[in-house]
Amino acid sequence: MASSLVELNALLDSFVPLSRKVSMAEIEVREKEAEALEKILARVWMAMPFLHDCHIINRRKLVPTGDNSWFAISNRLAFFDDGPHLFRSFVVEQWGTDSPAFEINDNRDISCNEAIQTYGFDVICAGLAEMLKCQCNVDVEYSNLQTRIKNIDSLLQVLEYRAELEPLLGKRITPEGERLLAEGNS
Protein backbone atom coordinates (compact mmCIF):
# COMPACT_ATOMS: atom_id res chain seq x y z
CA MET A 1 0.00 0.00 0.00
CA ALA A 2 2.84 2.39 0.75
CA SER A 3 4.23 2.03 -2.79
CA SER A 4 0.84 2.91 -4.33
CA LEU A 5 0.66 6.03 -2.13
CA VAL A 6 4.15 7.02 -3.22
CA GLU A 7 3.19 6.45 -6.85
CA LEU A 8 -0.05 8.43 -6.44
CA ASN A 9 1.83 11.27 -4.76
CA ALA A 10 4.43 11.33 -7.57
CA LEU A 11 1.67 11.38 -10.21
CA LEU A 12 -0.11 14.23 -8.43
CA ASP A 13 3.15 16.15 -8.14
CA SER A 14 3.63 15.94 -11.92
CA PHE A 15 -0.07 16.43 -12.72
CA VAL A 16 -0.59 19.69 -10.81
CA PRO A 17 2.11 21.63 -12.71
CA LEU A 18 0.89 20.10 -15.97
CA SER A 19 -2.72 21.20 -15.34
CA ARG A 20 -1.44 24.71 -14.58
CA LYS A 21 0.50 24.65 -17.86
CA VAL A 22 -2.62 23.56 -19.72
CA SER A 23 -4.64 26.37 -18.11
CA MET A 24 -1.99 28.92 -18.98
CA ALA A 25 -1.76 27.57 -22.55
CA GLU A 26 -5.57 27.81 -22.94
CA ILE A 27 -5.47 31.44 -21.82
CA GLU A 28 -2.62 32.20 -24.21
CA VAL A 29 -4.44 30.53 -27.12
CA ARG A 30 -7.63 32.48 -26.40
CA GLU A 31 -5.71 35.77 -26.17
CA LYS A 32 -3.92 35.12 -29.47
CA GLU A 33 -7.18 34.08 -31.15
CA ALA A 34 -8.83 37.27 -29.83
CA GLU A 35 -5.99 39.34 -31.26
CA ALA A 36 -6.33 37.54 -34.60
CA LEU A 37 -10.12 38.01 -34.58
CA GLU A 38 -9.72 41.75 -33.96
CA LYS A 39 -7.43 41.96 -36.98
CA ILE A 40 -9.83 39.86 -39.09
CA LEU A 41 -12.77 42.13 -38.15
CA ALA A 42 -10.72 45.22 -39.01
CA ARG A 43 -9.84 43.67 -42.37
CA VAL A 44 -13.46 42.76 -43.08
CA TRP A 45 -14.50 46.28 -42.15
CA MET A 46 -11.82 47.88 -44.36
CA ALA A 47 -12.48 45.56 -47.30
CA MET A 48 -16.24 45.85 -47.23
CA PRO A 49 -17.27 49.13 -45.61
CA PHE A 50 -20.90 48.70 -46.64
CA LEU A 51 -21.43 45.75 -44.28
CA HIS A 52 -23.57 46.48 -41.25
CA ASP A 53 -25.60 44.59 -38.69
CA CYS A 54 -24.70 41.23 -40.24
CA HIS A 55 -25.23 38.01 -38.33
CA ILE A 56 -22.12 35.86 -38.00
CA ILE A 57 -23.82 33.22 -35.87
CA ASN A 58 -27.57 32.79 -35.65
CA ARG A 59 -28.67 29.88 -33.46
CA ARG A 60 -32.34 29.36 -32.67
CA LYS A 61 -33.99 26.47 -30.93
CA LEU A 62 -37.77 26.22 -31.12
CA VAL A 63 -39.54 23.76 -28.82
CA PRO A 64 -43.29 23.10 -28.92
CA THR A 65 -44.79 23.24 -25.41
CA GLY A 66 -48.37 22.47 -26.37
CA ASP A 67 -50.75 22.37 -29.31
CA ASN A 68 -50.47 26.09 -29.99
CA SER A 69 -47.54 27.22 -27.87
CA TRP A 70 -43.79 27.42 -28.29
CA PHE A 71 -40.65 28.15 -26.35
CA ALA A 72 -37.65 29.57 -28.21
CA ILE A 73 -34.06 30.42 -27.42
CA SER A 74 -32.02 32.55 -29.82
CA ASN A 75 -28.34 33.26 -29.57
CA ARG A 76 -26.83 35.57 -32.19
CA LEU A 77 -23.43 37.09 -32.79
CA ALA A 78 -23.53 40.08 -35.12
CA PHE A 79 -20.93 42.25 -36.80
CA PHE A 80 -21.55 46.00 -36.60
CA ASP A 81 -19.70 48.43 -38.81
CA ASP A 82 -19.47 51.41 -36.51
CA GLY A 83 -16.17 50.24 -35.17
CA PRO A 84 -16.02 47.36 -36.18
CA HIS A 85 -17.31 45.45 -33.20
CA LEU A 86 -19.27 42.37 -32.19
CA PHE A 87 -22.72 42.35 -30.61
CA ARG A 88 -24.33 39.40 -28.83
CA SER A 89 -28.08 38.95 -28.65
CA PHE A 90 -29.63 36.32 -26.38
CA VAL A 91 -33.42 36.01 -26.43
CA VAL A 92 -35.72 33.66 -24.56
CA GLU A 93 -39.36 33.78 -25.52
CA GLN A 94 -42.58 31.85 -25.07
CA TRP A 95 -45.89 32.35 -26.79
CA GLY A 96 -49.07 30.49 -27.49
CA THR A 97 -52.80 30.37 -26.99
CA ASP A 98 -52.74 28.20 -23.87
CA SER A 99 -49.88 29.92 -22.00
CA PRO A 100 -48.86 33.47 -21.20
CA ALA A 101 -46.38 35.02 -23.60
CA PHE A 102 -43.08 36.56 -22.55
CA GLU A 103 -39.78 37.61 -24.02
CA ILE A 104 -36.46 38.23 -22.28
CA ASN A 105 -33.69 40.02 -24.20
CA ASP A 106 -30.05 40.29 -23.22
CA ASN A 107 -28.21 42.31 -25.85
CA ARG A 108 -24.75 43.81 -25.51
CA ASP A 109 -21.42 44.47 -27.13
CA ILE A 110 -19.06 41.56 -26.71
CA SER A 111 -15.27 41.52 -26.85
CA CYS A 112 -13.41 39.21 -29.19
CA ASN A 113 -12.15 37.24 -26.18
CA GLU A 114 -15.70 36.78 -24.82
CA ALA A 115 -16.97 35.82 -28.28
CA ILE A 116 -14.28 33.16 -28.58
CA GLN A 117 -15.11 31.79 -25.14
CA THR A 118 -18.80 31.68 -26.03
CA TYR A 119 -18.78 30.46 -29.63
CA GLY A 120 -15.26 29.31 -30.49
CA PHE A 121 -12.72 30.85 -32.86
CA ASP A 122 -13.29 28.36 -35.70
CA VAL A 123 -17.09 28.79 -35.54
CA ILE A 124 -16.77 32.59 -35.66
CA CYS A 125 -14.36 32.43 -38.63
CA ALA A 126 -16.71 30.05 -40.45
CA GLY A 127 -19.62 32.41 -39.71
CA LEU A 128 -17.66 35.39 -41.04
CA ALA A 129 -16.86 33.46 -44.22
CA GLU A 130 -20.54 32.60 -44.72
CA MET A 131 -21.54 36.19 -43.97
CA LEU A 132 -19.17 37.46 -46.66
CA LYS A 133 -20.42 34.88 -49.16
CA CYS A 134 -24.00 36.04 -48.56
CA GLN A 135 -23.21 39.71 -49.17
CA CYS A 136 -23.69 41.22 -52.58
CA ASN A 137 -21.77 39.49 -55.30
CA VAL A 138 -18.86 41.85 -55.84
CA ASP A 139 -17.88 40.24 -59.16
CA VAL A 140 -21.33 40.90 -60.63
CA GLU A 141 -21.35 44.44 -59.27
CA TYR A 142 -17.90 45.10 -60.77
CA SER A 143 -19.00 43.67 -64.14
CA ASN A 144 -22.10 45.88 -64.12
CA LEU A 145 -20.01 48.95 -63.31
CA GLN A 146 -17.54 48.12 -66.11
CA THR A 147 -20.45 47.85 -68.58
CA ARG A 148 -21.77 51.22 -67.43
CA ILE A 149 -18.30 52.77 -67.82
CA LYS A 150 -18.04 51.39 -71.36
CA ASN A 151 -21.50 52.71 -72.25
CA ILE A 152 -20.86 56.17 -70.85
CA ASP A 153 -17.45 56.31 -72.57
CA SER A 154 -19.17 55.57 -75.90
CA LEU A 155 -21.75 58.28 -75.24
CA LEU A 156 -19.05 60.79 -74.32
CA GLN A 157 -17.13 59.94 -77.47
CA VAL A 158 -20.22 60.54 -79.63
CA LEU A 159 -20.96 63.80 -77.82
CA GLU A 160 -17.38 65.03 -78.27
CA TYR A 161 -17.41 64.13 -81.97
CA ARG A 162 -20.76 65.85 -82.40
CA ALA A 163 -19.52 68.97 -80.63
CA GLU A 164 -16.53 69.06 -83.02
CA LEU A 165 -18.69 68.70 -86.17
CA GLU A 166 -21.49 71.18 -85.36
CA PRO A 167 -19.36 74.34 -85.75
CA LEU A 168 -17.92 73.00 -89.03
CA LEU A 169 -21.33 72.24 -90.49
CA GLY A 170 -22.90 75.42 -89.16
CA LYS A 171 -26.09 73.65 -88.26
CA ARG A 172 -27.45 70.97 -86.01
CA ILE A 173 -26.90 67.33 -86.93
CA THR A 174 -30.07 65.53 -87.95
CA PRO A 175 -31.26 62.40 -86.13
CA GLU A 176 -30.16 60.35 -89.16
CA GLY A 177 -26.72 61.92 -88.96
CA GLU A 178 -26.54 61.11 -85.23
CA ARG A 179 -27.37 57.47 -85.99
CA LEU A 180 -24.65 57.31 -88.63
CA LEU A 181 -22.15 58.93 -86.24
CA ALA A 182 -23.03 56.47 -83.49
CA GLU A 183 -22.61 53.52 -85.87
CA GLY A 184 -19.30 54.89 -87.10
CA ASN A 185 -17.94 55.20 -83.52
CA SER A 186 -18.97 51.77 -82.35
Image (cartoon, grey):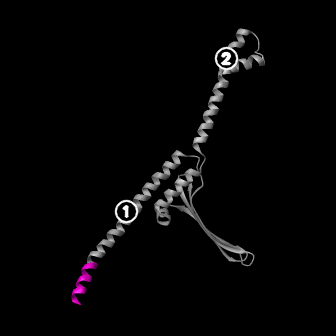
x%, y% of residue 127? 53, 57
Which residue in the structure is indicated by mark 1?
28
Q: Residue at the bottom extreme?
A: 1
Q: Is residue 35 visible?
A: yes
Q: Earlier in the sequence, mark 2 or mark 1?
A: 1
Classified by dominant secondary structure, the portion drawn in magenta counts as helix
Question: Can you say which quadrant of the picture contains the N terminus?
Answer: bottom left
For the residues labelled 2 and 1, say whether their Cβ atoms are less than 8 Å apart. no
Tell me the kind of residue under disc 2: Tyr
Query: Could you tell me which secondary element the residue under label 1 belongs to?
Result: helix
**Looking at the picture, does residue 182 appear above or below residue 129?**
above
Q: Residue at x 42, y 56 (%)?
A: 35
Labelled disc at residue 161:
2
Q: Nearer the viewer, residue 112 or 151?
A: 151
Residue 58, position as x, y percentages in the image: 58, 62
- Given residues 42 and 168, the one toward you in this image is 168
Find residue 63 and report its image quarter: bottom right
Q: Is residue 9 magenta?
A: yes
Q: Residue at x 64, y 33 (%)?
A: 148
Q: Which residues are magenta?
A: 1-12
Disc 2: CA contacts within 10 A as few (<14), some (14-19) or many (>=20) = some
Q: CA distance from mark 2 to mark 1?
A: 68 Å
Placement of 109 over or under 45, stated as above or below = below
Q: Position of residue 97 (x, y in %)?
A: 75, 76
Tell me if I can see residue 106 in this picture.
no
Which quadrant holds residue 174?
Answer: top right
Three-letter code, disc 1: Glu
Q: Closer to us: mark 2 or mark 1? A: 2
Element marked by disc 2: helix
As rendered, which of 102 and 153 lies closer to the eye? 153
- The crowd level at tag 1 (other Cα within 10 Å; few <14, some 14-19, many 20+) is few
The image quadrant where one finds the C terminus is top right
